[in-house]
Image (cartoon, rainbow, N blue to C red):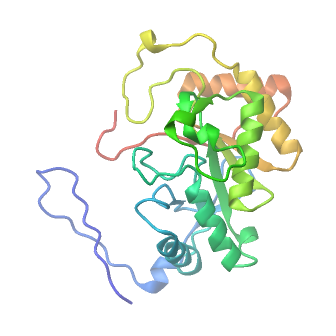
């Protein structure tokens, strides 16, 4: 087995790192955990796919998925309707990461039931190519064709259908809110700035009700939150209990080993 060394540089003061070399038997004994209060059993390592489509082409994507799923015993994939990133790349097409996962699944019949796919609906954006890409199109939307991205019922249902279409599957295991509709300091922004709060937020009850409708329709099994704080989590849970909608099973927030604020 070819051995590879992962070089981790935590600071300039850290001059060298001792890296453990794993044997094949160790690597392949991936542990499973129950995701939240669901019945989903997922690998401790989840494969993020936000590079699939820009830094990583389709063929290499398939090689990575083969290695992770067939050899490393990873069964948990994370993607989003806006992936890949960065969206500033001239070759960016929202949803391409989901499409590459779909093409791998097409080459591997029977694998869909063996893996857990989590994808995300984008939160507030005043002008979003990702939101415009939810419609059936012959060409990707341009920046000028961007439309507002919100977390109202109609937008969520349309976004879910678009992800299902790109993934070429009839269900999503975990459907997460990528970031809230209300203002929230996200993507590495440490401090909350009250002056950036907006009027006209979509009520959390409407977002929760949409998730409940998708669960009842069998389009998603569970739902989760992302890039939110304790206030947002409490709002979501209260709305779930009020509307008799299953509570979110997960939250995916910004986290850094280097900056623990």
* Residue furthest out toward the right: 216
Please give left or right for residue 177 compared with residue 198 in the image: right
Please state, as top left, top right, bottom left or bottom right, where the N terminus lies in the image.
bottom left
Q: Residue at point 21% right, 57% down?
A: 9
Between 182 and 167, the one nearer to me in the picture: 167
Which residue is found at the position 81% from the left and 58% from the top? 170
Which of 253 and 123 lies nearest the eye of the viewer? 123
Image height check: is 106 above or below 14?
below
Which residue is drawn at the image coordinates 67% and 79% (left, top)?
A: 107
161 w.r.t. 155: above or below: below
Residue 246 is at least partly visible in this image = no
Position of 39 compared to 3: left or right?
right
Instruction: Kindly indicate the quadrant of the structure image that contains residue 16.
Output: bottom left
**Image quadrant in which you'd find residue 44:** bottom right
**Position in image of residue 174 (x %, y %):** 69, 50
Q: Tell me how many marks there are.
A: 0
Q: Nearer the viewer, residue 76 or 213?
A: 213
For this orientation, the residue located farthest to the bottom is: 1
* Coordinates of residue 239 in the picture (x, y in percent): 75, 23
Split into 4 quadrants, where in the image is the C terminus? top left
Camera sees residue 230? yes
Q: Position of residue 125 (x, y in %)?
A: 54, 28
Q: Position of residue 139 (x, y in %)?
A: 61, 52
In the picture, residue 179 is in which quadrant? top right
Residue at image point 59% right, 37% down:
122
């Amino acid at each position: 087995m070819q051995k590879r060394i992962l070089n981790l540089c935590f600071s300039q003061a850290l001059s060298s790192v001792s890296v453990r070399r794993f044997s094949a038997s160790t690597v392949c004994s991936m542990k499973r955990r129950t995701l939240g209060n669901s019945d989903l059993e997922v690998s401790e390592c989840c494969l993020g796919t936000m590079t699939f489509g820009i830094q990583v082409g389709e063929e290499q994507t398939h090689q990575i998925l083969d290695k992770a799923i067939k050899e490393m015993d990873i069964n948990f994939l994370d993607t989003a309707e806006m992936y890949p990133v960065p969206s500033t790349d001239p070759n960016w097409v929202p949803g391409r990461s989901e499409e590459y996962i779909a093409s791998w699944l097409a080459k591997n019949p029977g694998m869909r039931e063996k893996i857990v796919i989590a994808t995300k609906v984008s939160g507030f954006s005043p002008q979003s190519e990702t939101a415009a890409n939810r419609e059936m199109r012959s060409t990707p939307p341009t920046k000028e064709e961007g439309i507002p991205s919100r977390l109202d019922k109609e937008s969520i249902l349309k976004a879910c259908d678009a992800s299902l279409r790109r993934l070429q599957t009839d269900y999503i295991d975990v459907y997460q809110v990528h970031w809230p509709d209300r203002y929230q300091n996200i993507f590495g922004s440490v401090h909350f700035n009250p002056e950036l709060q907006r009027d006209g937020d979509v009520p959390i009850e409407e977002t929760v009700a949409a998730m409940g409708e998708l669960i009842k329709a069998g389009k998603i099994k569970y739902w989760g939150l992302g890039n939110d704080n304790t206030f947002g989590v409490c709002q979501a849970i209260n709305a779930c209990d009020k509307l008799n909608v299953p509570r979110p099973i997960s939250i995916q927030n910004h986290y850094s080993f280097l900056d623990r604020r």
